[in-house]
């Protein structure tokens, strides 16, 4: 076993996706703000769809115009960017 640690910048947030009014959540994502771009890192659970991001971003990250994240398949890493 080995641990890989990624420090979080001051502009990062732990976002929990709650299905109801209670504290329970099924998904969690680290979101770092960089100007008009949100960088997604280390999510647990199914990623949000672009339409779900558009809804949530308007309320919590009004300056965001793009969302970026990495997708890994085998040894290949692909950079993905969605326009909001």
Image (spheres, rainbow, N blue to C red):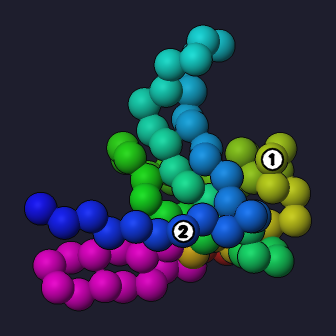
Q: Is residue 20 above or below residue 52?
A: above
Q: Specify the label residue 7 is tagged with.
A: 2
Q: Secondary structure at mark 2?
A: loop
Q: Residue at x 48, y 79 (%)?
A: 80
Magenta stretch: dominant SS?
A: strand
* 45 to the left or right of 60: left
Q: Residue at x 17, y 85 (%)?
A: 75
* 27 to the left or right of 74: right
* 53 to the left or right of 73: right
Judging by the rendered image, the residue that carries numbered circle 1 is 60
| Relative image position of residue 25 (x, y in whole percent) | 49, 27
Q: Which residues are magenta?
A: 69-81
Q: Residue at x 12, y 62 (%)?
A: 1
Q: Nearer the viewer, mark 2 or mark 1?
A: 2
| Relative image position of residue 29 (x, y in whole percent) | 52, 50
| Camera sees residue 84 | no
Q: Is residue 32 above or below residue 52?
A: below
Q: Is residue 36 magenta?
A: no
- Rounded to the nearest whole Å, what is the CA distance between mark 2 and mark 1? 22 Å
* 49 to the left or right of 38: left
- The residue lying toward the viewer, choosing from 12 and 18, is 12
- The residue lying toward the viewer, choosing from 6 and 31, is 6
């Amino acid at each position: 076993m080995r641990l890989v640690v990624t420090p979080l910048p001051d502009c990062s947030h732990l976002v929990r996706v709650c299905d109801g009014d209670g504290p329970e959540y099924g998904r969690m994502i680290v979101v770092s703000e960089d100007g008009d771009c949100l960088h997604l890192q280390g999510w647990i659970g199914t990623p949000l769809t672009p339409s779900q991001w558009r809804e949530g971003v308007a309320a919590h990250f009004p300056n965001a115009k793009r969302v970026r994240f990495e997708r890994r398949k085998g040894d290949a890493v692909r950079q993905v960017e969605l326009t909001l």
